[in-house]
Amino acid sequence: MRNTFPHFNAKPEFVQPDYSKWDEVEIGMSRDEVVELLGPPLEDEYHGGKVSVSDPYYTYGYLQMPLLPHPRTYEFEIGFDDNDNVFAKIDPFNGRFSPDGLPTVPEMIIPTERAIFSHYPRILDCRWFPSSGVFPITYTVECGFGESFESECFTDEEIESGLEIPFLIATFGGANTGRYRVKAKNELGESDWSDYRYFRFTV
C-alpha cells in the first residue's frame, strides 16, 4: 500500500532564520520592516505556495522531523494584523535560542508537573519543546521510579538515546510515582539535563 503521508518518513529538514535578526523582530513592527530585516518569506507548499503581500502569516523557517503527525508542526512565523503590523511571533523553541550553536536545555511540556493518571495500560506521553542550536539535534531520555512525590529515592535509567524527535511514548512499569528528564546533543556537544518532570500512576 502506498504511503499517502510522506512526511511520516521524510528526511529531516531544518530551515532556520538568523537568530540575531529574528530576535530584532518586535510586536508592532511593519511588514516592510520585517521583510527588510529577515528578507522574503519562504514560499512553502504547505501554506499555499506563492506568498502574497496580504498573507496574514509569513513563514521564515521550520523543523521537519521524522514521524511528525503534521508536516509543519514546528515553524518560525510572523503574524500581521489588518494594518500590516506584527501582532504575533512564533518559534519552535518557546523563545529560547542558542547563543553558540550548542543545544539548549530541553523544556518540558507534558506530562504537567505532578500529573496523576488512572488509565491502564500505563501509556506515558512525554513531550518537550525542541532544543535550539545547530541541527540535527538528538535527545536522550531518562526515566525513574519512586514511592512518592516527596521521595528522594528514585531508580533512574536511560530509556532512549539518539531520538530525533522531541517526544516519546513509553509504557510505565508500575502503579507508582515516576519522573523523567531529557538532554539534547548535536555535533558541537550536549546540553545539560532538563529539570525532572514528576507524575504518578494510580493503577
Image (cartoon, helix red, strand yellow):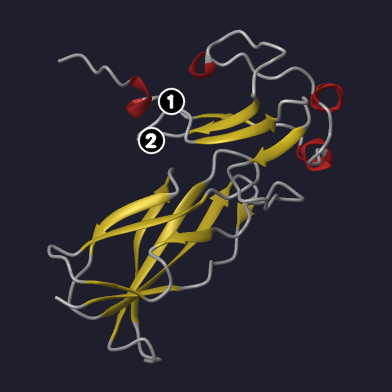
Position in image of residue 126 (x %, y %): 37, 58
Q: Secondary structure at mark 2?
A: loop
Question: Is 134 rendered above or below residue 125?
Answer: above
Q: Nearer the viewer, mark 1 or mark 2?
A: 2
Decide which of tag 1 and tag 2 comes sooner along the chain: 1
Label 1 to label 2: alpha-carbon separation:
11 Å
Q: Position of residue 96 (x, y in %)?
A: 67, 53
> Circle 2 is placed at which residue position?
68
> Tag 1: residue type?
Lys
> Along the horizontal axis of the image, is 79 left or right of 184?
right
Report the side of 122 relative to 91 (left or right).
Answer: left
Front-lying residue, 122 or 86: 86
- Most foreground residue, 200 or 184: 200
Q: Amino acid at mark 2?
A: Leu
- Drawn side of residue 196 relative to residue 117, left or right: right
Q: Residues within 10 Å of mark 2 (few under 14, many from 20)?
A: some
Q: Nearer the viewer, residue 116 or 184?
A: 116
The image shows residue 203 at horizontal and vertical percentages of 14, 75
Relative image position of residue 54 (x, y in whole percent): 69, 15
How dense is the environment of label 1, judged by Cα within 10 Å: few (below 14), some, or many (20 and up)?
A: few
Q: Residue at x 59, y 65 (%)?
A: 192
- The residue positioned 69% from the left and 39% from the top of the image is 89
Which of the labelled discs sits on residue 11, or is there none? Answer: 1
